[in-house]
Amino acid sequence: MLLLAIETSCDETAAAVVKDGCQMLSSVVSSQIAIHAEYGGVVPEIASRKHLEMITPVVSQALREAGLTMKDIQGVVATRGPGLAGALLVGLSAAKAIAFAQAVPFVGVHHIEGHIFAAFLEQPVAFPFLALVVSGGHTHLYLVENFGRYTTLGRTIDDAAGEAFDKSAKIMGLEYPGGARIDALARGGDCQAVRLPRPLINDGSLNFSFSGLKTAMLQRIAKHPVTIPGQDASDLCASFQEAVCDVLAFKTEAALRQNGIQRLVVAGGVACNSALRSRMNRMAADLGVELHIPTSALCGDNAAMLAVAGNYYLCNGYASPLSQDVTATWEMDRIKDQFS
Ligand code: KG4
Ligand code: ZN
């Protein structure tokens, strides 16, 4: 089945063509980061308007790069939520309009479901597996038993890991979104140089908290301003990353052990982080766990990732009605409700 996928949940207008839910024929991502950087974060109204401007050229480019035309498409998948309502509406409406015009089925999927199954575009993973999702809006541990069957084992009680990266970067005077800048600066740094807290690490739960770490960064910078680039900035970035990795690795290991799971998927934009990738690789090797972290291009927001679950749903008769609306907040545990 040839699927056209569309993603517009935040600040990336993305479209892709994927065959049989696994073979990526094209993946186009048009980023609005430079526009929002001026404001220090995503401005929802600007995001929606930019999606409107870009959606048609991005979809056309995805078809062109796949060597196909609209007539070849056999189904359309788009992000239904969670995300910015106005931004989601652009992609979902475009997807429904294309499906209607081409008389092919349409399905709306969960953005995080997309992130989790991005790994399948490289190699299928056997169920059940544990998914650690670390993005700008999520830091969650899910038990994944099948498509549509997700149980939340742990989650952040305040900021997401990506938010902690971006806020800490802002405190250091780095441009939005600062996750990748912290990663780059940390490369020459000493991760033991600055003592930072490991929030909730010993609370016995599988939950996370990152707001205290952000406050600790704020206090540290107030007392010891850093020069960028410079050794002190690199040391602070490396120490910050180490704190985030310690907490993520500790809770992920606990979730694997408690549930007797042998396979781990790490997904979302923060999975691009080089320190997290090597930490997870080491942990998986020590535990004898099979680890899947997609290449960086598939960790950040893209449309191809949506086609994996989309293909499963459409091939199993779970199309969405064209009356489907976006849902700005949507718990993964409730996904199966839409098909019952
Ligand atoms: O998954 P994503 O592209 O969008 C959301 O669904 O949120 O994740 C974006 C987040 C941002 O917070 C960004 O700073 C972070 O991923 N990020 C990184 C890196 N690359 C992107 N964080 C740490 N290290 C990186 N290399
Ligand atoms: Zn995302």
Image: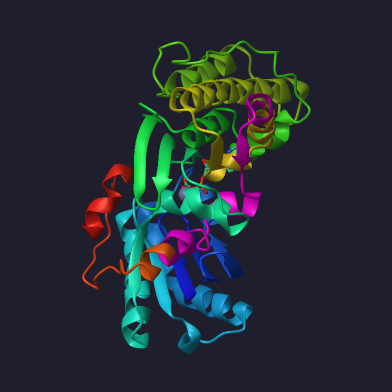
In this view, the residue in front, 182 or 38, is 182
Query: What colour scheme does the image use?
Result: rainbow
x and y, in percent, of residue 193 in the image: 70, 13
The image shows residue 293, relative to residue 44, as above or below, that is above
x and y, in percent, of residue 227 in the image: 71, 25
Name the quadrant containing residue 281: top right
Left or right for 188, reference 145: right
Asked whether the viewer can see residue 260, the reply is yes
In this view, the residue in front, 53 or 195, is 195
x and y, in percent, of residue 275 in the image: 67, 31
Name the residue rendered at 49%, 21% in the picture: 254
x and y, in percent, of residue 47 in the image: 41, 58
Name the residue rendered at 51%, 19% in the picture: 218
Name the residue rendered at 41%, 30% in the picture: 159
Please tell me whether residue 302 belongs to the stretch shown in magenta.
yes
The image quadrant where one finds the C terminus is: bottom left
In this view, the residue in front, 318 or 63, is 318
The image shows residue 6, relative to residue 143, as above or below, that is below
Figure label count = 0
Residues in magenta?
283-311
Left or right for 280, reference 47: right
Question: Which quadrant of the figure shows ligand 1?
Answer: top right
The image shows residue 101, relative to residue 51, as above or below, that is below
Asked whether the viewer can see residue 90, the reply is no
Name the residue rendered at 39%, 18% in the picture: 205
